[in-house]
Amino acid sequence: MSRDTLVAKRYARALFEVTFAEGKVAETQAELRAITEAFASDPALRKFVASPGVSAENKKKVLNSAFEGRVSVPVIRTVDLLIERGRTQLFGELRESYEHISNEALGLADATVYSAFPLTEEEKAAATERFGVLTGKKITITNIVDKSVLGGAKVVIGNTLYDGSLAGKLARLEKSFERQA
């Protein structure tokens, strides 16, 4: 784990504690997403914030006016802190860490389902229910069509892979034959 990732996690934890106490966790997730999207879509903004020739105070003024009314005070203060400490490159990692911390605390999890064909709404609902029971969390499904799956599905939740794909079953069968031989 890189030093930047560890630092981003500390900022995210502090921001989470403040926003959790205020009951604004979901709103903060949306605000952080909006900020990172603004940076991702605007090269001029990234260049401005990264420029060593612009003072931290000027950067804070510009960003505060740009996000004023659209972003809460704790998020603005976090942005200001990142600017003051020269850590603006952490915006993306901060958002990811915040989402991970808040989802964990709220009992939410994202599941990526890889399947050979798009899942129907009924299949998504069944997967949501089954993996919700398995993990003890409220699951949100994202379906990715992957022709290499052949049949069945692979489900990734956090760092855990549930491989029910035909390709995975064939690979496990092959390994069992190799062990027996």
Image (cartoon, helix red, strand yellow):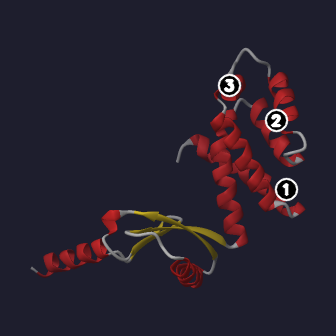
Q: What is the spatial separation of the Cα atoms under label 2 and label 3, in whole angstroms?
A: 19 Å
The residue pinned by badge 2 equals 80
Q: Amino acid at mark 2?
A: Asp
What is the residue that sits farthest to the top in this orientation? 53
* Residue on which the image places disc 3: 44
**Nearer to the camera, 165 or 25:** 165
Q: Is 75 placed left or right of 141 in the picture?
A: right
Q: Are marks 2 and 1 in contact (CB under 8 Å)?
A: no
Amino acid under label 1? Val
* Secondary structure beneath label 1: helix
Where is residue 71 shown, x and y percent of the image? 84, 46
Residue 11 visible, this angle: no
Residue 137 placed where, x, y %?
Answer: 64, 77
> How many numbered dots are placed on residues in this image?
3
Identify residue for label 1: 18
- SS at mark 2 in the image: helix
